[in-house]
Image (spheres, rainbow, N blue to C red):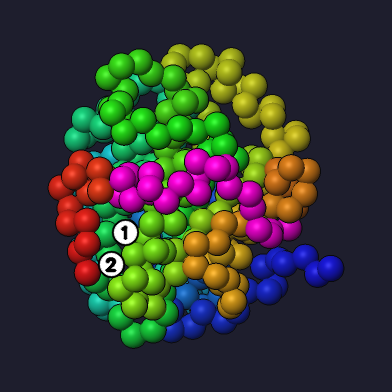
Amino acid sequence: MHSWNLDDMPDLSGRTAVVTGANSGIGAVTALALARSGARTLLACRDPERGRRALEAVRRAAPRSDARLVRLDLADLASVAEAADTVAKEADGCLDLLVNNAGVMALPLLRTADGFEMQFGTNHLGHFALTLRLLPVLGVTGPARVVTLSSLGHRIGRIDLGNLDAARGYSKWGAYAQSKLANLLFTAELDRRARASGRDLLALAAHPGLAATELGQAGPLLSGRKWAAKLERASRLYTQPASAGALPTLYAATLPDAPGGSYYGPRHLGETRGAPGPARRSGRARDRNMARALWEESARLTGLDADPV
């Protein structure tokens, strides 16, 4: 059976894509692959200096590409609003692909600029707000896709609508799993709403398996445990590189016949590594009632219209 790889990506000339967290890891690989395939690629990054270096790297590797930088801090809804306005302008009013890639993992209890628990606020609410603000320009002249990254960790996740702000206790891994479960519920509800409205928009999700990125180092460093960050770096001996971890995202973003609502990940060793293919959702990730409830609550928390278009 043929294993899908970067050589199978279609020509994306004339298309415009946004990748959040494009300054490193899977986001950087994704942005570069899209740029090399001809897409106008907007790198949405929190840190201006790291974003600038990532942009220069894309331009060096793909000198004919149209790559641009957008400032985006998903932990600040004001920044999300500004970034959405910038994207709409840079995309000339028509966006074809949004890759909700950025994320944080296993942090100590921290708050976003708007007071949300950091992992839920960044991984889910920031991307929720960005997507809703970009809906008016997604697929204006043709089909569009929104690809959101989840994780194998979603399988232990539970949504507690009454404690999304972690006011009644906090577990760093529980909060991470909840945010990744929220990513899948968001994808399912976005796809349902897009179909119901007749929009030419597909919502899909992906996960990287076990990939060697910087994601796992932030939590230990913020907790003052440098030894744990070093241990996480050592774990790269049994993980796949970011270049492989990005394949499910690119598969979801470009596979011609991908059905809306699909979820993709590595095919081998319990979905931890290998070529991309269909991934398994937990039962809670298939809960349609929770998907609707989470959508409505997310709209309330972010102050956005639940049905913007």
The answer to whether residue 112 is seen in the rendering is yes
Quarter of the image where the C terminus is located: bottom left
Residue depicted at 74% across the width and 42% down the height: 270
**Residue under pointer 1:** 131
* Callout 2 secondary element: helix
Q: Is residue 153 magenta?
A: no
Q: Are marks 1 and 2 in contact (CB under 8 Å)?
A: yes
Residue depicted at 27% across the width and 64% down the height: 134
State whether residue 230 is above or below residue 72: above
Within 10 Å of the Cα at label 2, are there few (<14), some (14-19), or many (20+) other Cα atoms? Answer: many
Residue farthest front in this picture: 289
Residue 74, how many percent across, how many down? 31, 45
For badge 1, the amino acid type reads Thr
Tell whether 76 sits left or right of 138.
left
Tell whether 13 sits left or right of 240.
left
Quarter of the image where the N terminus is located: bottom right
Marks 1 and 2, how far apart in space? 6 Å
Residue 48, how many percent across, how many down? 33, 48
Residue 86, how many percent across, how many down? 23, 64
The span shown in magenta is 275-295
Viewer-proximal residue, 273 or 230? 273
For badge 2, the amino acid type reads Leu
Viewer-proximal residue, 271 or 33? 271
State whether residue 3 is above or below residue 54: below
Residue 135: give its label: 2
Residue depicted at 41% across the width and 43% down the height: 182
Viewer-proximal residue, 45 or 193? 193
